[in-house]
């Protein structure tokens, strides 16, 4: 019985990995006209409601802190996000979107809404 369960887990994992790849591909397509990548959109989206430290973004998104740090630094370099002081922790600054970052994410909204409608149908 254990082999059957192991095969079921493997098939499920492969399906999830394929689905993740498809979502990333679609996210890149949606984000490209706004000058973003799927990863940039993901990190900006995490800090739209409130500024977060890089470690908080990583936890919320289920990705490594190092990959978030790399993307966050790129977003800051391009003026799409900024680091602001964190009252709870002197060294772990908070990442927050700039007006340009918010505008870039808003450019994605029409395509995102259209995709959601197509999937719902």
Image (tube, grey):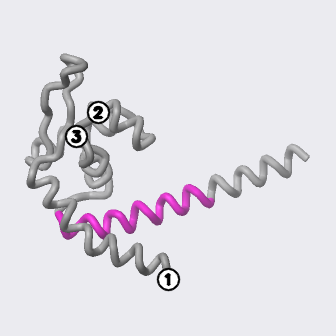
Secondary element at image label 1: loop
Secondary element at image label 3: helix
Q: Residue at x 26, y 74 (%)?
A: 110
- Does the segment drawn in magenta span residue 16? yes
Residue 54 tag number: 2
Task: Identify which residue, 61 or 17, lies in the foreground.
Answer: 61
Q: Residue at x 27, y 55 (%)?
A: 41
Label 3 and label 2: CA atoms lie apart by 8 Å
Task: Identify which residue, 79 or 96, lies in the foreground.
Answer: 96
Q: Which residue is mark 3?
A: 72
Disc 1 crowd rating (10 Å Cα; few below 14, some 14-19, many 20+) is few
Please give the range of residues in magenta. Answer: 15-34
Q: Residue at x 91, y 47 (%)?
A: 1
Percent x, y for residue 66?
Answer: 33, 33
Q: Which residue is mark 1?
A: 121
Percent x, y for residue 38?
Answer: 32, 57
Secondary element at image label 2: helix
Residue contact between numbered discs 3 and 2, judged by CB atoms under 8 Å: yes
Label 1 and label 2: CA atoms lie apart by 37 Å
Q: Is residue 20 left or right of residue 97?
A: right
Residue 102 tag number: none
Mark 1 or 2, closer to the camera? 1
């Amino acid at each position: 019985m254990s082999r059957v369960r192991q095969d079921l887990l493997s098939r499920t994992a492969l399906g999830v990995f394929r689905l993740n790849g498809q979502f990333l591909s679609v996210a890149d397509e949606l984000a490209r006209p706004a000058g973003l990548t799927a990863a940039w959109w993901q990190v900006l989206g995490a800090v739209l409601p409130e500024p977060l430290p890089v470690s908080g973004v990583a936890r919320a998104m289920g990705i490594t802190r190092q990959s978030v740090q790399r993307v966050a630094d790129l977003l800051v370099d391009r003026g799409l996000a900024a680091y602001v002081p964190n009252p709870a922790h002197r060294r772990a600054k908070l990442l927050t979107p700039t007006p340009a970052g918010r505008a870039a994410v808003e450019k994605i909204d029409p395509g995102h809404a259209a995709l959601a409608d197509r999937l719902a149908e």
